[in-house]
Image (tube, helix red, strand yellow):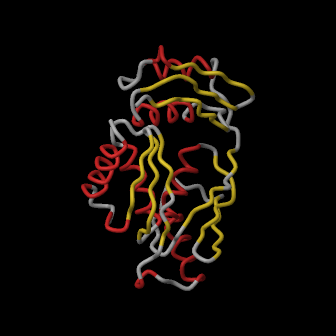
Amino acid sequence: MSNDELERCVSDELSWDPKVDSAAIAVVADRGRVTLRGTVGSFRERREAAHAARRVRSVTSVENELKVRPLTEHGREEADLRGAVLRALELDSLVPKTIEPRLDDGWVTLFGTAAWQYQREEAATVAGNVPGVIGVDDRIDLKNPEPSPGDVKESIEYALARNAELDAHDLTVDTHDGTIAVMGRVRSWSQHDTAIAAAWAAPGVTEVVDHIVVDS
């Protein structure tokens, strides 16, 4: 697919997604690498635009340079915005009470600890969905849970093998002190995300190193 064709396909996908206002988004493609530039009205919309671009066939990477300019009605005082973020985190049962947000001119920095990666991801997603937030910096530490019996490497490889979206023969896993490195090639970003999620789901994992190549 040529650069012009890929730019057109990504722009069409952005226009098709009702969660994204693509009017002020410019798409630049270079041999599978896509860059998004322009402005959006919320941090959530910025994130959704990147997800939409990654859905397009032949996209191998997405550089998200979109700037967030909140709509006027979502402009808030810092204390009010912090209160809204706190309430959103407290109302989500997946977010541990050990996570605390700090605000600085619309940016949310998340501190504290969590036992699992999905809890850290949930906190970042919830905070980013609050109107008025322009960015999220995740500094949450993972506390190493007790590993389940069995070898973590074998557990992850088995999880990859039983997943219908993946060809486990194209992926390899290496482990060292809670760090998991996943290597190999996949055919889409959906497969990439499935493989990384499988690695994060293993007990005892505190970091996942992504060496997966998405074929165009």
- Residue 44 lies in what quarter of the image? bottom left
Residue located farthest toward the right when viewing the structure as drawn: 177
Q: Is residue 102 left or right of residue 28?
A: right
- Residue drawn at 44 percent across, 61 percent down: 46
Residue located farthest toward the top when viewing the structure as drawn: 169
Q: In this view, does 106 lie above or below 95?
A: below
- Residue drawn at 45 percent across, 37 percent down: 60
Q: How many labels does the image show?
A: 0
Residue 203 in the image, given as x and y percentages of width and height: 61, 32
Residue 36 in the image, given as x and y percentages of width and height: 44, 56
Q: In this view, does 46 lie to the left or right of 79?
A: left
Q: Is residue 208 above or below residue 75?
A: above
Placement of the N terminus among the 4 image quadrants: top left
- Residue 49 lies in what quarter of the image? bottom left
- Residue drawn at 48 percent across, 42 percent down: 61
Placement of the C terminus among the 4 image quadrants: top left
- Residue drawn at 37 percent across, 36 percent down: 58
Residue 185 in the image, given as x and y percentages of width and height: 49, 24
In this view of the protein, which residue sits in the foreground, 111 or 104? 104
